[in-house]
Amino acid sequence: MKLRNLHSLEDGADLPEEESGKLSTAWTAGMLDPEEKAKFVEYLVHQSQLFEVLRKLVSQRYKQAGERQFDFSNPNVKDSMLYYEGYKQALRDIHKILPNT
């Protein structure tokens, strides 16, 4: 049974930091009322401690996924690799929309 740890430049690395203080437009997409939108943005800004913890958790899970070892003698290794690549992409997407306060 051969185990191999796959590493690219992205695997096991930190996720890229977004610009500080920027809020993804995904949070307010579809909000038509400017007052409602402003109140919601203000609410999100006040959740900086929560987002900081969540960003750390997502980054930690991303690193763990990048350190995954695959058994290349297993005929289903391709499925496992595709699963973890999809998982890492989902973590990158979540990380991207989290406010960096």
Image (cartoon, rainbow, N blue to C red):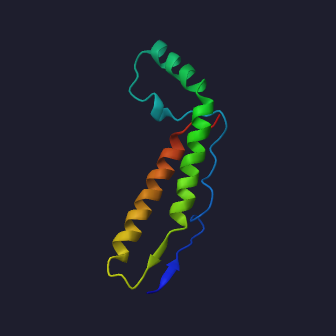
Q: Percent position (x, y) of residue 37?
A: 48, 19
Q: Percent position (x, y) of residue 96?
A: 53, 45
Judge by depth and name the residue closer to the eye, 78 or 57: 57
Asked which quadrant contains residue 80, the reply is bottom left
Instruction: Please state the total of marks drawn on the protein image.
Output: 0
Query: From the viewer's perspective, is residue 55 above or below residue 76?
Result: above
Q: Percent position (x, y) of residue 55?
A: 58, 43
Asked which quadrant contains residue 23, the reply is top right
Query: From the viewer's perspective, is residue 87 above or below residue 17?
Result: below
Residue under the point 50% across and 69% down:
68
Q: Percent position (x, y) of residue 17?
A: 64, 47
Q: Can you say which quadrant of the picture contains the N terminus? A: bottom left
Query: From the viewer's perspective, is residue 12 above or below residue 55?
Result: below
4 left or right of 48 in image: left
Residue under the point 56% across and 72% down:
7
- Residue farthest toward the front in the current orientation of the protein: 1
Q: Can you say which quadrant of the picture contains the C terminus? A: top right
Asked which quadrant contains residue 15, the reply is bottom right
93 left or right of 11 in image: left
Residue under the point 51% across and 52% down:
92
Residue under the point 52% across and 35% down:
24
